[in-house]
């Protein structure tokens, strides 16, 4: 039986056995208060151990996993669940009741950051429940196509060697699970299908199709050689391509990938991710060590370090920021200075760059630029190229003011939110606004050309073929993308158009 894929979040062509992940027990029964409390404690402990284990094997994702672990062991959460058990509910029912209430409150929140946290809490709830009830049938030797309602990052990370594909009912292109699937090269699609565990499934995003229990002929046609993903690892980038490809990274592991794939440069290093993996600001020395390692790995190719971009959707407890933007540097001057100094000191080849996020006006940009130059002079560092992200409506409207920026990188994720109210979890609507967005960028292209400034796009849409083509047509040839997505774009303009 064939089904249409509604949305492709990560491309691929794969065949495997279905695993319908059933997390909940249908009718959990209250046995005794004592028994229910034992079940709850056991599940919290087991969940905490599991998450610690996964964290050890995935240091690059430690911050996400630690957040989930802290939710699982949260004493206030436990207190609420215990109170419900004391009212005569089973541990499963009590846990669902309390966590669903949290989830509902977060889902109704006005803050994007808090709304996105519903995914984390859903994930923790399902993990706690599954540790109370059944163990699923996963074993590391098995390879499955996971059929699930919602895919959460920790499940994916934990089962990254068993999962060869994912079919989910819900999900968004810029969600963390989607970014991970693209990074791990696992096909991930949104579709409504009927199947049972152990059914054979073929996902083929080239034809937007899922085949459940394919005919023998279709199974035979499935090419073993191509059964790996469409996206290959270890691709050498063609240098005759008419695009310049840059990589988006947030840790040393991804820098290594960018280097292996032979990227022209790193167009966006999301440095705030390093801060999220710690309970205090990273020191100058810690940052210097990470940045100089990156510089070495890229062997002289340019790296654009974005100064920490926190607030709104990225909250760091110890940095107290509720809004993205320049204020975060003004209220944390020592952290800004330590970061900028570390970047400049690590700039061994002289071609690292500094980029400011969420700039609203030229006066903000010049204020930060002057500040960086002062730090450089004070410490005898070479002043690097200093550029800006274009991701606010105000900056777009006044683009001609930014004469001193050395380069511009367009952050379409934030800009889409600012211009059209698009949330990161609603990516699938990009067709509704992308033409208008591209059109609105024409003055930026003209300004960059006139003033001879390098111009790139680093939002998630840059790695979508059709959108990349639209950027090409208005004169944007530099695309900064998730390293593993290069195969989608690595072709000449003619190949692109004729494909
Ligand atoms: C963007 O806003 O498009 C961007 C690349 O930055 P981030 O997703 O980190 O906000
Ligand atoms: Mg942004």
Image (spheres, rainbow, N blue to C red):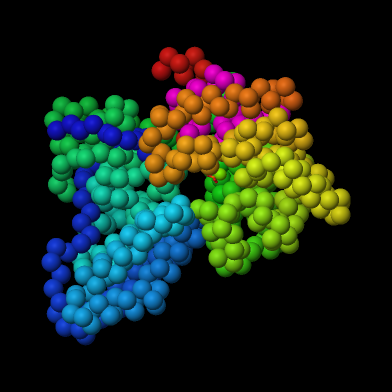
Q: Is residue 15 above or below residue 243?
A: below
In the rendered structure, the answer to whether residue 319 lies left or right of residue 6 reads right
Look at the image and say whether residue 381 sits in the magenta stretch.
no
Q: Residue at x 63, y 50 (%)?
A: 325
Foreground: 124 or 364? 364
Image quarter for ligand 2:
top right
Q: Quadrant of residue 221?
A: top left
Q: Where, quadrant-wise, is the C terminus in this rendering?
A: top left
State the residue at coordinates (46%, 29%): 434
Q: Position of residue 373 (x, y in %)?
A: 82, 47
Residue 459: in magenta span:
yes
Q: Quadrant of residue 366?
A: top right
Q: Position of residue 280 (x, y in %)?
A: 61, 67
Residue at left offset 34%, top offset 39%: 187
Q: Is residue 367 left or right of residue 234?
A: right
The answer to whether residue 385 shows anywhere in this view is yes
Vertical arrangement, residue 242 with respect to residue 237, above or below = above
- Residue 148, position in %: x, y? 25, 49
- Which region shows up in magenta? 453-480
């Amino acid at each position: 039986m064939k089904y249409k894929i509604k949305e492709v979040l990560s491309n691929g062509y794969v065949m495997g056995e279905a695993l319908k992940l059933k997390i909940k027990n249908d009718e959990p029964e209250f046995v005794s208060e004592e028994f229910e409390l034992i079940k709850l404690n056991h599940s919290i402990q087991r969940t905490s151990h599991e998450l610690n284990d996964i964290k050890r094997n995935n240091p690059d994702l430690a911050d996400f996993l630690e957040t989930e672990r802290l939710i699982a062991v949260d004493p206030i959460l436990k207190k609420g669940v215990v109170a419900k058990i004391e009212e005569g509910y089973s541990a499963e029912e009590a846990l669902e009741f309390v966590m669903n209430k949290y989830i509902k409150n977060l889902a109704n929140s006005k803050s994007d950051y808090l709304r996105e946290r519903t995914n984390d809490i859903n994930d923790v709830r399902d993990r706690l429940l599954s540790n109370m009830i059944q163990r699923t049938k996963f074993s590391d030797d098995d390879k499955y196509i996971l059929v699930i309602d919602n895919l959460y990052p920790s499940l994916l990370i934990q089962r990254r060697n068993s999962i060869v594909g994912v079919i989910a009912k819900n999900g968004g292109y810029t969600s963390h699970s989607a970014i991970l699937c693209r990074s791990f090269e696992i096909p991930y699609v949104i579709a409504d299908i009927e199947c049972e565990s152990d059914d054979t499934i073929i996902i083929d995003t080239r034809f937007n199709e899922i085949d459940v229990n394919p005919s023998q002929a279709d199974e035979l046609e499935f090419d073993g050689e191509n059964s790996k993903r469409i996206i290959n690892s270890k691709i050498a980038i063609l240098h005759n391509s008419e695009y310049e490809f840059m990589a988006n990274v947030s840790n040393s592991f991804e820098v290594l990938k960018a280097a292996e794939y032979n990227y022209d440069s790193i167009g966006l290093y999301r440095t705030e991710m390093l801060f999220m993996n710690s309970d205090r600001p990273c020191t100058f020395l810690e940052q210097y060590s990470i940045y100089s390692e990156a510089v070495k790995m890229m062997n002289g190719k340019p790296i654009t370090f974005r100064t920490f971009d926190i607030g709104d959707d990225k909250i760091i407890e110890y940095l107290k920021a509720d809004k993205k933007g320049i204020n975060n540097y003004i209220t944390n001057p020592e952290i800004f200075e330590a970061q900028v100094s570390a970047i400049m000191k690590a700039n061994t080849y002289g071609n690292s760059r500094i980029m400011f996020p969420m700039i609203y006006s030229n006066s903000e940009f010049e204020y930060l630029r002057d500040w960086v130059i002062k730090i450089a002079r004070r410490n005898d560092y070479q002043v690097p190229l200093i550029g800006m992200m274009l991701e606010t409506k105000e900056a777009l409207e006044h683009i001609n003011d930014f004469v001193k920026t050395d380069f511009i990188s367009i952050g379409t994720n934030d800009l889409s939110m600012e211009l059209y109210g698009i949330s990161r979890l609603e990516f699938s609507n990009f067709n509704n606004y992308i033409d208008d967005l591209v059109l609105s960028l024409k003055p930026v292209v003209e300004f960059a050309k006139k003033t001879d400034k390098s111009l790139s796009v680093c939002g998630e849409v840059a790695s979508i073929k059709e959108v990349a083509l639209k950027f090409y047509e208005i004169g944007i040839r530099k695309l900064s993308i998730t390293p593993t997505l290069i195969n989608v774009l690595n072709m000449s303009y003619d190949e692109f158009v004729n494909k």
